[in-house]
Amino acid sequence: MDALIPLFIAIPLISAFLIMLLGKLVKEFHRFFAPLTLLSLLLMSIYAYVNLGSSSIQYTLGGWGMEKGIPVGIYMVLDGFSVLMLCIINLLGFIALFYSLSYMAKYTAQRNYYSLFCLIIAGMNGVVLSGDLFNICVFLEVSVIASYALVAFGVGKTELEASYRYQVLGSLGFMLILLAVGLIYWKTKTLNIADIRHVFENGYSKPFYIFVQVMLIAGFGLKAAIIPFHAWLPDAHSSAPSPISAMLSGVLIKAVGIYVLIRLFFNMFVFSQEIALVLTSLGAVSMVVGSLLAIVQWDVKRLLAYSSISQIGYVVMAMGMGILLLLKGNSEAAAILAIGGAIYHMINHAVFKGLLFMNAGAIEHRLDTRNLKEMGGLSKAMPVTSTTSFVASMSISGIPPFNGFFSKLIIIVAAINGRFYLLAALAILVSIITLAYFLKFQRFAFYNKPFGKALEKIREVPFPMSISMIVLATLCLAMSLLAIPSVSEQLLRPAIDVLMQSELYSTTIFGI
Amino acid sequence: MTVYLLCFVLFLVGLYGLITRRNLIKIIISKAITEFSVFLFLVLIGYIDQGQAPIVNPGSVDQVYVDPLPQAMVLTAIVIGLATTAMLMAIAIRLFRKYKTFDIREIKNLRG
């Protein structure tokens, strides 16, 4: 089992290399090799998910483990939380790649596309698995640099401009993260997350601690597009080719932003009241402002991008609430609800936001426009796109029986149980605003009077695109089963436990 | 202490340029300056006064060595910095071909 861990990074890296190398010699090599790679990764991650349970396994690179009680090597850690992230990354990666088989047909240089896609997957798997601060930085840049290139893949005016802005802000975020990592190394003389936890538990100086945490929030907040750091996201996510938008909004901002923030603030730092308040209020602000910015958009993909900011706000807010409740000490049940709701909403958001971007891509594929005012009446011409996007819209705006309803409900119940009445009210308000702008999307795209040209010419999208949308829509329904306590006890509990018992992460690595 | 302060000043200089410059190439240069101030800081962390290159010599027991780990980190970080700079330059060249200017005030199809 622990021999599986490096394969999650090695397979996509090798396949990215092989696609560039052999793609020149063998015709259409990339079209079957890249999906094969992602399929094998998906099967591997499901195998790991089923077999891991609530245990945690480590892999030490090159066999360099403990020397006199100090971890000297590079550690890779697979536990309940990271295996969940691996599943969702590789699942959405496979479906998006299958979708791009016909979507990308109109672009040139497809070999580069598939190769870069594998690099993004390799980087994200690396971030999720790494148990070492500096390796997180390196893998983060692997996936993010590949995404810079993919955002600019259309090489039009807007794509290039969006990519330039994304790169400048992204590298600023990287520098802040690197500076924070340097500062942490300066004080603790180690880079291993478990070892740093060990040092911090034995005491730290408060001003330094706060400074580093704020730096990390700014750095990873830039990658995750929490509100004051969000300026690049709507441009980058709306200019990229649609399957890439689905990947960026669905999993990249979570894997390199939210996942790392959660991992560091739960398992590396000792909790502190101030930072938990900062996280909660940042989450609440981005939840509200993101939805208010989304409602005025007329470009479909920009609307979806702003709604990503707002939904990510839910996750960050619930996480901050979880820390606050854990610090209070007497409200463990509410803390479990808050953390579980955050994780649940995170994986739900990956599924329905991926689906929505694929719907937008399907519309763009047939109509060649992203402006809502130039669409209309598509529900007859494109029944599959219309139905799946209806499922996704209802799911994201929290209508039962879809998965979005249950995760939002859990977060709101947690807020009420923990006596954060203002936050609960805000969450409900934002959910209503979300419903408003998704009804706007539904009405103008699918049900209004047709715009301009005749609808007879417009047909449903080709098979690979429609089947991947149907799969994701089915998942939207199926994942609402996770709200049943006995099911979530099996599937979500290991991930929640990793965060609830935050000191366990370091003690298992030290083998105490 | 002075070195650390100078290093921080360099960081601020880069950040100032990143915020105020209007030229695509100058933004990239400012980004590089900020990046190198971080690299300098990382190297300074590992420096120990009178320390030698960390090649262990079995003969001398109480020899002081500098910390090699930040050096390895900096080498990796420089390669990443090179990749991002090259990528930014490539995009800037493509932008110049489309717009015939480097001025970001004239390149604004998108609004935040």
Image (cartoon, coloured by chain):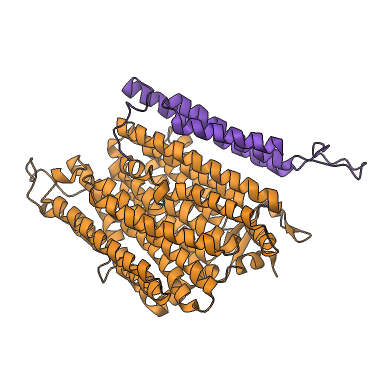
Please report the residue visible at 41 percent of the width from the left and 58 percent of the height from the top. A283
A476 lies above or below B92: below
**Total numbered badges shown on the rendered structure:** 0
Pick the front one: A481 or A140: A140
Residue A52 visible, this orientation: no
- The image shows residue A202 at horizontal and vertical percentages of 70, 64
Image colour for chain B is purple
Q: Residue at x 18, y 54 (%)?
A: A440
The answer to which image quadrant residue A280 occupies is: bottom left
Left or right for A215, reference A358: right
Q: Quadrant of the C terminus of chain A?
A: bottom right
Q: Position of residue A19 (x, y in %)?
A: 45, 39
Up the image or down, A106 lies above or below A473; here it is above
Asked where in the image residue B94 lies, by quadrant, the reply is: top left
Is residue A322 among what the camera can see?
A: yes
Picture quarter with the N terminus of chain A: bottom right
Q: Colour of chain A?
A: orange
* Residue B85 placement, left or right of A364: right
Foreground: A274 or B60?
A274
